[in-house]
Image: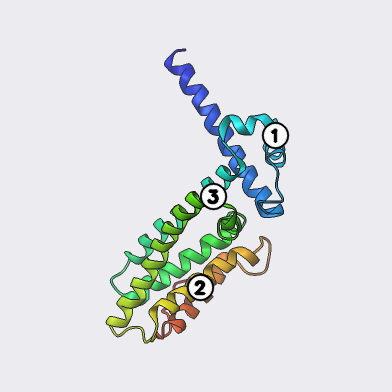
Amino acid sequence: MDVVADSAEQSRADATRARLLDAAVTAFAERGFHGTTTRDIAAAAGLSPAALYVHHRSKEELLYLISRSGHEHVLALVREAVASSADPAAALLRVVHDFVVTHARDHTTTRVVNYELAALSPAHLAEIREIRHHIEQAIRQLVEAGVRAGVFQTPDPRMAAAALLSLGVDVGRWYRDGGDLSPEYIAARYAEMALRIVGAGSPDAGTG
């Protein structure tokens, strides 16, 4: 095969893998990991059941890839937001706003990413937990920096950081498209609550 043919074949394979991942997200969100069969995923992707095993070793591998991609995206988002300002309050507003918007807009994926972890293999779960640790650490360190600067007054930065993360993650569980509240509106209100959780003042205008 020439280079052009090889490239076209690789592009087709990549597109098929992406279709399978998208189908798995939808199926896992609707039925749960254990309630979804490989046949369900293949059918949703418009492929034969055997096609899944050509591109992925197992249903669990699909869940792992979805979870890893989602967690890596959130870690990058959080780190970028933390670095966006030397003012801990401004940085926290950005972190919470971006975190919540992402969990609302991508609510189907974030439900799978956050609520199907128990179905991962021990090795894959350990890898995902490590990424989650980095996310938690970044937010906790931001809260601690705010306390040291006298901007935040919380007596327990670890618990405050856990509360902030829980608020954002839970948006993916209950948010649905077409409701009265936009992701941006929810994010702006959650950002206000975040400052109260860490014992800071009222946010400036412009986060919504």
Is 131 on the left-hand or right-hand side of 48? left
Q: On the image, which quarter does residue 110 sit in?
A: bottom right
| C-beta proximity under 8 Å, tags 3 and 1 | no
Q: Position of residue 173 (x, y in %)?
A: 63, 64
Q: Residue at x 42, y 57 (%)?
A: 131
In the picture of the structure, the residue carrying the numbered disc 1 is 46
Against 173, residue 40 (above or below) is: above
Residue type (three-letter) at the residue carrying disc 2? Ala
| Sequence order check, earlier mark of 3 and 2 | 3
Q: Residue at x 56, y 51 (%)?
A: 120
Is 71 on the left-hand or right-hand side of 83? right
Q: Position of residue 33 (x, y in %)?
A: 65, 51
Image mark for residue 188 = 2
In the picture of the structure, the residue carrying the numbered disc 3 is 121
Q: Nearer the viewer, residue 91 or 10?
A: 10
Against 164, residue 27 (above or below) is: above
In the structure shown, which secondary structural element does the residue marked by tag 3 occupy? loop
Q: Residue at x 53, y 48 (%)?
A: 64
Q: Position of residue 118 (x, y in %)?
A: 58, 57
Looking at the image, which residue sits at the far top?
A: 1
| C-beta proximity under 8 Å, tags 1 and 2 | no
Q: Residue at x 46, y 64 (%)?
A: 98
Residue 106 seen in this snapshot = no
